[in-house]
Image: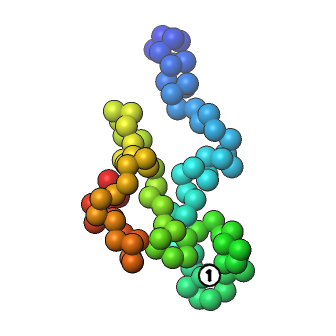
Amino acid sequence: MPSGSNEKTNSLSQQTEKPHHYKYLKEFRVEQCTQFLQHKCSQHKPFTCFNWHFMNQRRRRPIRRRDGTFNYNPDVYCTSYDETSGICQNGDE
């Protein structure tokens, strides 16, 4: 394999964000807090827990598709969002 194409492959697979930042971008409040369900989360107040406690805190995990677009646009409000349950009837896509 020519070295030029190998360099291109490596640069595409490299993570450019710091690991701590990358974790927040990808994982912050996408999973429910199991400790909160057991009434044992010490970070519930002042709401500093990394995971979500209530459905209205839940975030969708951003996924970049092969074509370079993401699975959803965070700037576009879901038109079928249920304020009570925190669920978008259109799904996560």
In the foreground, 51 or 7 = 51
Percent x, y for residue 91? 30, 61
3 vs 31: above or below: above
69 vs 81: above or below: above
Count of marks, rendered view: 1
Percent x, y for residue 92? 35, 58
Residue occupied by mark 1? 35
Q: Is residue 1 left or right of residue 21?
A: left
Q: Quadrant of residue 52?
A: bottom right
Percent x, y for residue 50? 63, 65
Percent x, y for residue 25? 57, 49
Q: Is residue 63 visible?
A: no
Looking at the image, which residue is at 34% across and 65% down?
81
Looking at the image, which residue is at 52% across and 68% down?
57
Q: Residue furthest bottom?
A: 39
Q: Is residue 84 left or right of residue 48?
A: left
Q: Is residue 59 visible?
A: yes
Looking at the image, which residue is at 38% across and 76% down?
85
> The residue under label 1 is which amino acid type?
Gln
The 10 Å Cα crowd at callout 1, few under 14, some 14 to 19, many 20 or more, is some
Q: How is the image coloured?
A: rainbow
Q: Is residue 2 left or right of residue 92?
A: right
Secondary structure at badge 1 equals helix
Looking at the image, which residue is at 34% across and 57% down?
78
In the foreground, 13 or 56 = 56
